[in-house]
Image (spheres, grey):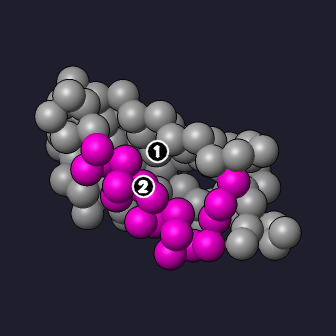
Amino acid sequence: MSNVINPAVCGSLQSNDCLVEVAPADTLIIEVQSPLKDRFGDLMEAAVRTSLQAAGIDKAYVRVTDRGALDCTIRARTKVALERAGRSHS
């Protein structure tokens, strides 16, 4: 498994998009901020977890600030943020 090396971001705060921020952490922390969190928060977190698992990341701080993004957008933004952050193998 890998860890995030540097802080990185991807996305925007425009309507139908999301801003994904990643940073190094000692554990896995996923924070979702969205006006739709009560209804779709679990699905948003699952999209992030899918991207983290695909990248082999098990330790990172991930914050998603959502503005109505689809799950495919959340996965894509998370993937790019992780690529920008780099990773170290533990």
Compared across the picture, whether 79 is left or right of 56 comes to: left
Which amino acid does the dot numbered 2 rest on? Answer: Val
Q: Of marks 2 and 1, which one's residue comes earlier in the chain?
A: 1
Disc 1 is placed on an element classified as strand
| Type of amino acid under label 1 | Val
Quadrant (top left/top right/bottom left/bottom right) for the C terminus: bottom right
Contact (Cβ within 8 Å) of mark 2 with mark 1:
yes
Residue found 63% across the figure and 47% down from its top: 28
Q: Main secondary structure of the magenta part?
A: helix
Mark number for residue 67?
none
In the figure, 59 relative to 20: above or below?
below
Residue 2 occupies quadrant: bottom right
How far from the left and from the top, in percent, is residue 67? 24, 34
Expressed as whole percent of the image width and height from the top left, the position of residue 78 reads 46, 57
In the depicted structure, whether residue 1 falls above or below residue 24: below
Distance Cα–Cα, label 2 vs label 1: 9 Å
- As helix, strand or loop, the secondary structure at mark 2 comes to helix
- List x then y, in percent, for residue 25: 74, 43
Q: Is residue 36 left or right of residue 82?
A: left
Badge 2 is on which residue? 48
Which quarter shows the N terminus?
A: bottom right
Magenta segment range?
Answer: 42-59
Disc 1 target residue: 20
Image vertical order of residue 67 relative to residue 76, above or below = above
Looking at the image, can residue 15 be seen? no
- Residue 20 located within the stretch drawn in magenta: no
Question: Residue at 78% of width from left, 44% of height from top?
Answer: 26
Residue shown at 62%/73% (left/top)?
56
Quadrant position of residue 73: bottom left
Q: Is residue 22 above or below residue 55?
A: above
Mark 1 residue crowding within 10 angstroms, few (<14) / some (14–19) / many (20+) = many
